[in-house]
Image (spheres, helix red, strand yellow):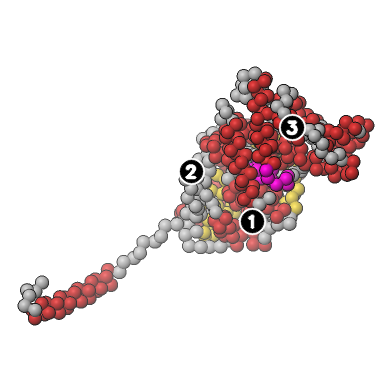
Amino acid sequence: MTENNQTQLGNTLWKIADELRGAMNADQFRDYMLSFLFLRYLSDNYEAAAKKELGKDYPAPKGSVTPLAKWYKENPKDINDFEKQMRRKVHYVIEPQFLWNSISEMAKIQSNELLRTLQDGFSFIENQSFDSTFQGLFSEINLDSDKLGKNYSERNKKLCNIIQKIAEGINSFDKNIDYLGDAYEYLIGKFAAGSGQKAGEFYTPQRISDILSGIVTLDSQDPSKGEKKKIERVLDFACGSGSLLLNVRKKMTDAKGTIGKIYGQEKNITTYNLARMNMLLHGVKDTEFEIHHGDTLLNDWDILNEINPSKKREFDAIVANPPFSYRWEPTEAMGEDFRFKSYGLAPKSAADFAFLLHGFHFLSKEGTMAIILPHGVLFRSGAEERIRRKLLEDGNIDTIIGLPANLFFSTGIPVCILVLKKCKKFDDVLCINAVDHFEKGKRQNNLLPEHIQKILDTYKHRKEEDRYSRRVSMEEIIKNDYNLNISRYVSTSLDEEIIDLKSVHKKLVTIDKVINKAKETHNKYLKELGLPPI
């Protein structure tokens, strides 16, 4: 499917969502819309695999009965072996009555059993479809909500209409199932745009995601060597809908590299469910990712809570867009936490460095971490200055990138990207000031592909350019009391032109002489004509 078709599909589905959500706000309806897209993807993928597995035994479509439902009815003794094969090959099973084609057929005939079938189907997928548990995957979708209707009959009718419209919208496009992952991402972005401040909880704009993934997939020691051949483990400890992690994966596969397991953590339950769906929608098998629902600052994920250094889980690439200047309540015991002990605690008013230190602790020696933070982390004093100073003295801050203002749905403030490494080749800090490089939009500013490429090329080759980038020595940073305010090192303002007053005076005298000579000639002609001089 072409990019234009993907956009058209996204717009079609968005229009359906806007027309059908009724009394629901965009945030509430988002969960229904995306869950139905998810069910459609799982079903299409499963039926394609079943057709391949059964070969000539796969029944031809006939009437309202789906092929797999027909096969189940005709081959009851073979069902168990068939499902074992499907678990081995596609890692999950969906019973025929819960497949999208069965559900959409029920919607088409306005079956009064659709709502109950959906409830049973969601429960089956959560608890029985996968070998690993996906419990709570649909926990935020209330099919008994009054927003859908006052009683069962009204709710059932509403769901029939929604599913029928979605089915019609999707069926008018390419049947390649890969497009559904892109449609899912597109709708997440559209819902984020309509959610304003709330969007900061789950969405990193695609272009910014491209910068972070572009950075962490380059060779850690010498980015000019190009992309890494392999990333064993990648982590996003504030993963939202998982788009950043998926972007890293896509970047690696596009570069013909390999990527191992994807790890994400998310505190918000709704967003956590979006992330798990998003992984599966993009063809990531349940064995290839692990998303944890929990609080990153409390570090309640067992696999990251290993005190023994020899057993510590480490990651080759870490990306993150944590909540900006999040207020937190660090306890005295946290001062002894292995993540913070060597640096001290971030202030209560802003957990920015607490998030950074959490991720940095789990970065491998050959890894790269790229994190989006507010500019304040570069120059604020007190506890943050002490943390910044130690990171600089230990040679862990590799690059700082200043981005334009108003790029996010959740805030208009300009942000920066910090690139950190435990073992870096260069003893200076690369400062990139990209604040003036963007396309102005009505609501949000945008980064164009050329803006992103310029940032990545500058990082990759450690280029220096007037009013854009500079390699700053540690001696200069120390002289500035470890202040990393980017404009202090790379000013984007144009130097005022120095005016040579002697030269200007000389030009004025010359001009004055020319004027007087022209005046004399003019008056001479006037006199010959018998007219008074001027």
Residue type at the position of mark 1: Lys
In the rendering, which numbered label is found on residue 105? 3
Q: CA distance from mark 2 to mark 1?
A: 39 Å
Q: Secondary structure at mark 3?
A: helix
Foreground of the two, 314 or 43? 43
Q: Secondary structure at mark 2?
A: loop
Residue in the picture at 70% in, 53% down: 252
Task: Look at mark 1 in the image and give the residue it sits on.
Answer: 424
Q: Is residue 528 left or right of residue 175?
A: left
Question: Does 369 appear in magenta?
Answer: no
- Tell which circle, 2 or 1, labels the residue nearer the N-terminal end: 1
Q: Is residue 525 left or right of residue 295?
A: left
Q: CA distance from mark 1 to mark 3?
A: 58 Å
Q: How many marks?
A: 3
Residue in the picture at 64% in, 47% down: 6
Do the numbered discs 2 and 1 sit on residues whose CB atoms are within 8 Å? Answer: no
Task: Look at mark 2 in the image and give the residue it sits on.
Answer: 443
Residue type at the position of mark 2: Arg
Residue type at the position of mark 3: Glu
Q: Is residue 484 left or right of residue 34?
A: left
Relative height, residue 217 to residue 65 (above, below)? below
Residue 220 location in percent, x, y?
A: 67, 56
Bounds of the magenta segment? 172-186
Relative height, residue 33 to residue 172 (above, below)? above
Q: Secondary structure at mark 1?
A: loop
